[in-house]
Each structure stands twice: as structure tokens, then as C-alpha cells.
Image (spheres, grey):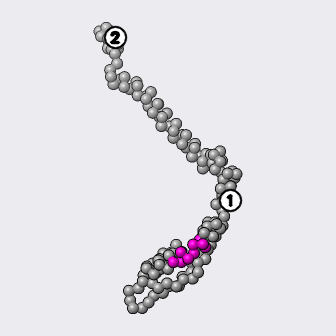
């Protein structure tokens, strides 16, 4: 009987036991493959939102390149006034509908303002044509939307 017990103890492991032995190694590798990128992304996000990473990349507000870009973008806009216009609206009834409008155009630079002034007759003609094709209802909707904003 003693011989039978030793034979059972010396039997080779089954396939299920091999799978259990290999599982912990693969589990650690998977954990490392998932945890390392997550930790790196978390560290990068922390550095970005604390302001360390933008400073290293030259994107911080105190950086000379960023302040030069901000100064270029901080120029005050230029306004160009168009002369007042009176236009006959496209109405369906017998009563004529007119609109009197004064427009100011906003441009980025003074050089753009000069170009707009040079093209003023064409702009007036385009605006007159546009207004003549509008119905009073469309104009009311347009101004209501502008007031809401």
C-alpha cells in the first residue's frame, strides 16, 4: 500500500495545474502594460495642469515667445463707418417699407481699414442690393437674433 501512495504523489501535473502556474506571470505583465501608460498619462496631466509642462515647452504666459504672440494679438480693432443708407424693402402689400441703417465694420488692422475705405462704393452697392431683397419679417428676425446675443 505504501507503494501505491508514492506513485500517486509522483504523478505528473495535469493541464489545469499548468495553466494556474502560468497565469500569475501573464497577470503581472498585463498589469505592468496597463499601469505604466496610465501612470505616465497621469503624471503628464499633473505637470500640464500645474503649469510645469507648458513652461518647459515654451507655452507659459511669462515666456518671451508667448508674450510676443499675445502682444501681436492684443492690437485694438479698427472700426470703419459706412455712410447711412436708406433702402426700400421687398414688401408684399401696397405700403412701401423702408429701412434706414448705419453700419460700422470692425477690421483687425489699419491697413485693412484703408482697403475697406477704398472699396466703399462696392460695399454700399452690395448692401443696398441685399437690403432691397429682404422682407420686413426677415429684418425683424435678424435684429431680434442680434439683440438676444
Where's residue 11, x and y in %? 33, 14
- Give SS at disc 1: helix
State the residue in front, 97 or 9: 97
Residue at image position (56%, 77%) is 121
Where's residue 116, x and y in %? 59, 71
- Give SS at disc 2: helix
Circle 2 packing at 10 Å, graded few (<14), some (14-19), many (20+), is few
The answer to which quarter of the image holds residue 72 is bottom right
The answer to which quarter of the image holds residue 24 is top left
- Specify the quadrant that holds the N terminus: top left
Q: Which residues are magenta?
A: 116-125
Where's residue 89, x and y in %? 45, 84
State the residue in front, 26 or 14: 26
The answer, for residue 108, to whether it is visible in the render is yes
Q: Is residue 101 above or below residue 58?
A: below
Disc 1: which residue = 71
Total numbered labels placed on residues in the image:
2
Disc 2: which residue = 6
Q: Dominant secondary structure of the magenta stretch?
A: helix
State the residue in front, 146 or 79: 79
Residue 71 lies left or right of residue 121; in this view the side is right
Q: Nearer the viewer, mark 1 or mark 2?
A: 1
Which residue ends up furthest to the bottom in the rendered image?
94
In magenta stretch: residue 118: yes
Where's residue 125, x and y in %? 51, 78
Q: Is residue 67 above or below residue 88?
A: above
Residue 58 lies left or right of residue 22; in this view the side is right
Amino acid at each position: 500500500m505504501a507503494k501505491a501512495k508514492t506513485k500517486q504523489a509522483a504523478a505528473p501535473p495535469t493541464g489545469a495545474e499548468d495553466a494556474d502556474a502560468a497565469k500569475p506571470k501573464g497577470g503581472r505583465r498585463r498589469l505592468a502594460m496597463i499601469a505604466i501608460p496610465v501612470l505616465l498619462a497621469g503624471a503628464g496631466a499633473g505637470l500640464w495642469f500645474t503649469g510645469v509642462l507648458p513652461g518647459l515647452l515654451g507655452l507659459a504666459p511669462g515666456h518671451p515667445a508667448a508674450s510676443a504672440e499675445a502682444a501681436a494679438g492684443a492690437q485694438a480693432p479698427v472700426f470703419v463707418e459706412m455712410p447711412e443708407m436708406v433702402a426700400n424693402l421687398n414688401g408684399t402689400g401696397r405700403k412701401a417699407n423702408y429701412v434706414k441703417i448705419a453700419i460700422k465694420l470692425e477690421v483687425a488692422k489699419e491697413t485693412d481699414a484703408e482697403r475697406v475705405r477704398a472699396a466703399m462704393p462696392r460695399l454700399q452697392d452690395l448692401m443696398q442690393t441685399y437690403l432691397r431683397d429682404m422682407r420686413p419679417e426677415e429684418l425683424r428676425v435678424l435684429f431680434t437674433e442680434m439683440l438676444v446675443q
